[in-house]
Image: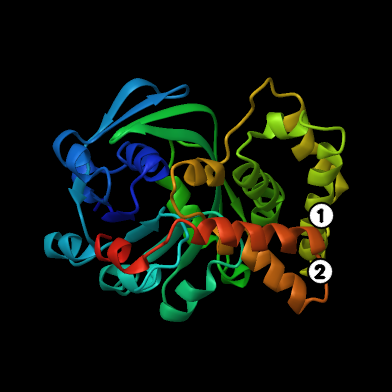
């Protein structure tokens, strides 16, 4: 029997993986929780314009506004995929998805940041929990319409790492049309991506400039970004991930250095320009907290964290209305 899948947070990332999953299971087995794009998605589904899979790729999952509506349709889901942004909602995201979790449900986190898994592990100690790191150049250009260009890769691992790779391997078999890699310890991949996310994201958001623009803004810019990355690497090293090294930092910097102007607009910058709240805690705050716990000094990252918080609070984030629409 084909698995039943719930996707919580069906923006650009969720829509792409709804499309990929629909190649392995009937689209009627996929239920997508949508907010801002509900009207369009409920009427027309999602259209993916992809450099890999082709133009005008369609997927028509079952579209709902809330988890409660999803439960009314089907009380049992084999997979609950969380692809929403990591924002502080009340109730929390783990609490919001709780009605959809039953015995044997595998929870899959397709989200940015570090140290984001524990709230799910505490609330659902007996359920398989998969943590992933996604590289997917996808943008929702209008409600229900997604443009995918270039890279597409999903790193998958069980949390905690000691729980083995069986659940991760089963999940990736459903993603046969995507590029996946299974890891015994996914946290190395999280730290590796965080070198980019915890540096470029807030720097670009605060400066209102894309990465290539930042690098060309002054002779000191590259050293500044590099020093922030070194602080992130020092925290990763203190947590046992010695492979987060100067070599990886050089690779990350090189990607931005060779880009033509204006460069890439990170998600946090896009959110700031649109007046939306940013994933400050998951991407930056948790690194700073872990640094304090391990006695690692991060003066530059701590300053960036403080400034990013000021910017984020300026958007007057109100968690309750957002949570009520989930």
**Residue 241 visible, this angle:** no
Eyeballing the image, is 24 above or below 320?
A: above
Residue 225: percent from the left, percent from the top? 78, 44
- Depth check: give the residue in front, 314 or 184: 314
**Residue 273 visible, this angle:** yes
Residue identified by numbered label 1: 243
Residue 297, quarter of the rendered image: bottom right
- Tag 1 secondary structure: loop
What is the image's colouring? rainbow
Residue 101: percent from the left, percent from the top? 31, 70
Q: Which is nearer the N-term, disc 2 or disc 1?
A: 2
Q: Residue shown at 56%/71% (left/top)? A: 163
Per the rendering, the mark at residue 238 is 2
Residue 207, quarter of the rendered image: top right
Residue 74: percent from the left, percent from the top? 16, 62
Relative to 324, 244 lies left or right:
right
Eyeballing the image, is 14 above or below 211?
A: below
- Tag 2 secondary structure: helix
- Depth check: give the residue in front, 145 or 278: 278
- Depth check: give the residue in front, 147 or 26: 147
Q: Residue shown at 48%/75% (left/top)? A: 119
Q: Residue shown at 36%/44% (left/top)? A: 11
Residue 61: percent from the left, percent from the top? 22, 43
Q: Residue shown at 55%/42% (left/top)? A: 269
Picture quarter with the C terminus: bottom left
Relative to 315, 242 lies left or right:
right
């Amino acid at each position: 029997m084909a698995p039943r899948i719930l996707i919580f947070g069906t923006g650009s990332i969720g829509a792409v993986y709804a499309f990929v999953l629909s190649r392995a299971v009937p689209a009627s087995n996929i239920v997508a929780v949508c907010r801002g794009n509900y009207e369009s998605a409920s009427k027309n589904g999602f259209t993916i314009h992809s450099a890999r899979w082709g133009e005008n790729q369609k997927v028509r999952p079952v579209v709902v506004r809330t988890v409660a509506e999803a439960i009314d349709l089907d009380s049992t889901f084999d997979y609950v995929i969380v692809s929403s942004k990591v924002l502080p909602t009340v109730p929390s995201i783990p609490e919001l998805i709780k009605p959809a979790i039953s015995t044997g449900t595998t929870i899959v986190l397709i989200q940015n940041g570090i140290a984001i898994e524990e709230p799910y592990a505490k609330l659902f100690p007996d359920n398989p929990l998969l943590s992933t790191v996604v590289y997917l150049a996808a943008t929702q250009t209008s409600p229900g319409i997604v443009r995918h260009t270039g890279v597409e890769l999903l790193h998958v691992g069980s949390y905690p790492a000691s729980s083995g790779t069986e659940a991760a391997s089963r999940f990736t078999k459903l993603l046969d049309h995507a590029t996946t890699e299974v890891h015994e310890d996914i946290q190395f991949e999280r730290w590796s991506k965080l070198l980019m996310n915890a540096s470029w994201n807030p720097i670009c958001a605060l400066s209102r400039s894309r990465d290539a623009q930042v690098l060309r803004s002054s002779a000191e810019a590259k050293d500044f970004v590099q020093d922030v990355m070194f602080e992130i690497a020092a925290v990763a090293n203190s947590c046992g991930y010695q492979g987060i090294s100067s070599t990886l930092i050089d690779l990350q910097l090189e990607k931005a250095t060779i880009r033509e102007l204006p460069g890439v607009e990170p998600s946090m910058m896009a959110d700031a320009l649109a007046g939306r709240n940013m994933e400050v805690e998951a991407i930056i705050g948790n690194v700073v907290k872990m640094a304090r716990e391990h006695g690692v000094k991060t003066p530059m990252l701590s300053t960036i964290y403080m400034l990013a918080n000021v910017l984020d609070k300026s958007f007057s984030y109100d968690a309750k209305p957002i949570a009520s629409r989930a």
